[in-house]
Amino acid sequence: MRRVVFNQKGGVGKSSITCNLAAISAARGKRTLVVDLDPQGNSTHYLLGKPAADLKDTVADMLEQTVAFTVFNRRPDEFVHASPFDNLFVMPSSPELDFLERKLEAKHKIYKLREALKKLGESFDAIYIDTAPALNFYTRSALIAAQRCLIPFDCDDFSRQALYNILNEIRDLQEDHNEDLVVEGIIANQFQPRASLPKQLVRELTEEGLPVLPVRLSSSVKMKESHQSRQPLAHMAPKHALTRQFEDLFKVLHGETVELEPLAD
């Protein structure tokens, strides 16, 4: 399964959600790949412990060969790096993505990522794609390449308005490029259960028929500590409440039974 985590708004936890779901997948014995399409390289740094600028054989290198004159292109798996965690691999980002974007767009290479990930799907059980906070060539490529889309949502009114725009953009892309793409769910992230506004917004979005997932991810300093230590929560703090929430989210996405508390008034 190829999943993309996408939101045009920054600071909503795309990289954290991508990496922690992928880490749980890998810990369960699934051969799992994270593809980092954000030039900032947060997922790359989180899982490999190195800034994207320090790495060779990146996703930018893989895409660049589609616009360069080469007799033989390297295989997609040659741009995959093993992480320190069993079964978890990364196709790292690069700052070069910013400079490469116009070339790829001019050469109409929007489907090349999908071709590469379909090939990688022969050797990986799960692929998670992290994206930049923008609707650009790379995020469109990711949405075209993916089978499922997860949308992180931080519970405020600005995010709500942005959410409607995102869903419209995805609908257009489904019609024109990827009819198999499914919006798997909206993830309420950095949720504050004692505040009335987040609960109100989640309830209203659910009543509108939007696919809000029943697991809400709490705001916690433990996530920042996880970033600093370069360890997903499943490895750094396996018994922490936020880790359990990620595990419940993973179970929901895979159709497993989870006991969830109702959204209190």
Image: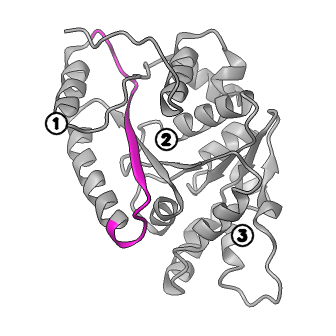
C-alpha gap between disc 1 and disc 2: 24 Å
- What stretch of residues is rendered in magenta? 175-194
Q: Is 186 rendered above or below residue 54?
A: above
Disc 3 residue crowd, few under 14, some 14–19, many 20+, Cα 10 Å? many
C-alpha gap between disc 3 and disc 2: 23 Å
Q: Is 185 rendered above or below residue 217?
A: below
Give, as a three-letter code, the residue at label 1: Glu
Q: Which mark is residue 62?
A: 3
Q: Which mark is residue 146?
A: none
Tell me which residue sits at (51%, 83%) in the image.
Answer: 108
Q: Secondary structure at mark 1?
A: loop
User: How far across and down, in percent of the image, does residue 224 sit?
Assistant: 57, 25
Q: Secondary structure at mark 3?
A: helix
Give, as a three-letter code, the residue at label 3: Met
Q: Is 196 rendered above or below residue 79?
A: above
Figure quadrant of the C terminus: top left
Q: Is 243 rendered above or below residue 210?
A: above
Give, as a three-letter code, the residue at label 2: Lys
User: How far across and down, in percent of the image, does residue 221 sit?
Assistant: 52, 17
Q: How many marks?
A: 3
Looking at the image, which is closer to me, 41 or 69? 69
Disc 1 residue crowd, few under 14, some 14–19, many 20+, Cα 10 Å? few
Tell me which residue sits at (40%, 51%) in the image.
Answer: 182
